[in-house]
Image (cartoon, rainbow, N blue to C red):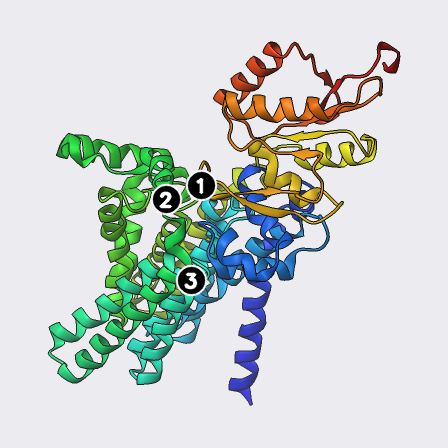
């Protein structure tokens, strides 16, 4: 009975820790801020039939796009509850990863779990992940795979191997990082069995790794390979290690990336952060989980190698959220290990326990101070596509042409309430399609962001205006780059058109008689 009560209380504590996400993120802000360009092409997938998901989900994992439908209500920004949910769920594997190490007593184990959970809650890289992207799922899957690895080491079983395998290839449906962490975990397990010369377990682990690789390869070819277009490599070009320029340039690049990102770890300067991470790895090994430690450590050389091969960006704030979060959790375990070592050095007793708890509290306060500037942050890029779309819907006459810039098509399609959007193949963007309205020919989307396509779209709109009427041509433009802005300026000047400004950046061109105003 006492054991059951203790477990129930501890489970309740974990749930409360998860719910702290609601305190550290401004939920009201998330539900008010319109989707910006990079979110809109994720959100708009909910406007298409589910059978089209493989074609429209682009570089977002298909499982994420599928789950998004459960969180999307109307034309609201409710979808942002999905990344927030994964930010909360990531607390659970972090807690149990640290909690279920072979600590000397339950109290030390619970403190370790609480510190690991706090690391997930307070690491700045997670605090700023409020936008509609899968990066909190990356963190969750990474920690879940590490926790599954530790579980397997605690009690070896074929069931545990299957669980780890499913977490790796199944996790790929939600997270690209699952493939990296799964490979590191299975490789680490094989390596440890090889060192131990446990040939039976090595054979089981190697067979599991082979099956996982084959299934993962199938998941990749079915759902991910389409998104690997040359433009994606170009987009991330500034986050690849410049190996062609030599070792010195490569080392300088890596150090520069660390310098740009160090504040998002929340671990303080390198002289403090690195020893804490090393202490975490040593603690995990000493407490009976060597493969888990090897897997966690292997993530860094793995990501460095992928960046050198130009396959994955290194230390971009979004795509490296999983790596930063896992590192913070390992550092938190390091803090718990140091506290346990200090307590053992002082030979136990009330004084030793008080000193250990004080050290843990100081570490937690330091985490909190580093996280302070990022708590309830408002860092989502503002683009008023919702406001522009709603204004045009309310003020445009039924025959008024509406020209939607190429960069605004996804956001417009998400917020537009009249009719149903369709897709048009387009090799000129990373999503490989545009959202269009074939049933509403007055809605015109340029095929590209360049001068020729913008001019063609405006010429088409002008051709729809009937002489002598008070028709307006409405312009919806958000998320433009400098080249696109220049192209629009040149087109409007060349056609001798002067847009009139409306609220939130919407504009219109009055083509009717002067009396129309």
Q: Which mark sits nearer the N-terminus, 1 or 3?
A: 3
| Residue 386 drawn above or below residue 181 | above
User: Which numbered circle lies on residue 430?
Assistant: 1
Of residues 418 and 342, the one nearer the viewer is 418
Image coords of residue 339 (percent x, y): 35, 60
- Left or right, 300 with reference to 196: right
**Foreground: disc 1 or disc 3:** 1
User: Which numbered circle lies on residue 141?
Assistant: 3
Q: Secondary structure at mark 1?
A: loop
Image coords of residue 469 (percent x, y): 84, 20
Image coords of residue 27 (percent x, y): 66, 48
- Left or right, 281 with reference to 203: right
Neighbourhood count class around disc 3 (C-alpha, 10 Å): few under 14, some 14–19, many 20 upward: many
Q: Secondary structure at mark 3?
A: helix
Q: Are marks 2 and 1 in contact (CB under 8 Å)?
A: yes
Neighbourhood count class around disc 1 (C-alpha, 10 Å): few under 14, some 14–19, many 20 upward: some
Of residues 443 and 135, the one nearer the viewer is 443
What residue is at 57 percent from the left and 75 percent from the top?
9
Query: Can residue 189 be seen here?
Result: yes
Q: Quadrant of the C terminus?
A: top right
What residue is at 58 percent from the left and 56 percent from the top?
82
> Which residue bears the numbered disc 2?
229
What is the CA distance from the residue labelled 1 to the residue labelled 3? 25 Å
């Amino acid at each position: 009975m006492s054991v059951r009560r203790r477990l129930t209380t501890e489970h309740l504590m974990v749930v409360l820790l998860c719910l702290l996400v609601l305190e550290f993120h401004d939920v009201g802000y998330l539900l008010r801020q319109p989707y910006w360009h990079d979110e809109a092409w994720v959100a708009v997938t909910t406007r298409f039939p589910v059978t089209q998901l493989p074609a429209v989900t682009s570089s977002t994992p298909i499982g994420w796009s599928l789950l998004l439908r459960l969180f999307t209500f109307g034309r609201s920004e409710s979808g942002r509850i999905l990344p927030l949910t994964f930010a909360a769920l990531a607390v659970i594997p972090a807690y149990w990863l640290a909690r279920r190490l072979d600590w000397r007593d339950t109290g030390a184990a619970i403190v370790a779990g609480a510190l690991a959970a706090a690391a997930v809650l307070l690491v700045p890289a997670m605090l700023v992940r409020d936008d509609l992207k899968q990066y909190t799922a990356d963190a969750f899957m990474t920690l879940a795979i590490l926790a599954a690895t530790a579980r397997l080491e605690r009690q070896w079983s074929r069931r545990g191997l299957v669980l780890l395998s499913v977490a790796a290839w199944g996790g790929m449906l939600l997270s690209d990082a699952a493939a990296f962490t799964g490979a590191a975990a299975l490789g680490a397990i094989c390596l440890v069995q090889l060192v131990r010369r446990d040939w039976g377990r090595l054979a089981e682990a190697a067979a599991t790794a082979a099956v996982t690789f084959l299934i993962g390869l199938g998941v990749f070819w079915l759902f991910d390979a389409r998104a690997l277009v040359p433009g994606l490599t170009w987009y991330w070009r500034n986050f690849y290690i410049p190996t062609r320029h030599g070792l010195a340039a490569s080392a300088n690049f890596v150090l520069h990336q660390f310098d740009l990102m160090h504040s998002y770890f929340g671990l303080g300067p390198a002289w403090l952060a690195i020893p804490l991470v090393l202490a975490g790895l040593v603690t995990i090994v000493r407490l009976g989980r060597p493969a888990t430690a090897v897997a966690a450590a292997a993530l860094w050389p793995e990501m460095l190698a992928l960046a050198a091969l130009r396959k994955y960006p290194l230390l971009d704030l979004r795509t490296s959220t999983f790596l930063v979060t896992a590192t913070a959790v390992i550092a938190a375990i390091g803090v718990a290990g140091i506290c346990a070592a200090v307590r053992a050095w002082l030979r136990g007793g009330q004084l030793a326990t008080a000193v250990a708890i004080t050290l843990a509290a100081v570490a937690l306060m330091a985490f909190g101070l580093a996280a302070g500037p990022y708590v309830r942050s408002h860092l989502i890029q503002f683009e008023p596509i919702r406001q522009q779309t709603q204004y045009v819907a309310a003020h445009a006459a039924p025959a008024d042409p509406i020209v939607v810039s190429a960069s605004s098509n996804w956001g417009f399609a998400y917020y537009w309430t009249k009719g149903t959007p369709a897709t048009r193949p387009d090799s000129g963007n990373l999503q490989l399609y545009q959202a269009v309205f074939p049933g509403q020919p007055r809605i015109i989307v340029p095929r590209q962001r360049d001068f020729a396509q913008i001019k063609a779209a405006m010429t088409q709109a002008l051709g729809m205006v009937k002489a002598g009427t008070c028709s307006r041509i409405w312009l919806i433009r958000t998320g433009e780059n400098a080249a696109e802005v220049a192209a629009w300026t040149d087109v409007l000047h060349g056609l001798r058109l002067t847009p009139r400004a409306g609220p939130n950046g919407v504009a219109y061109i009055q083509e009717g008689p002067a009396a129309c105003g």
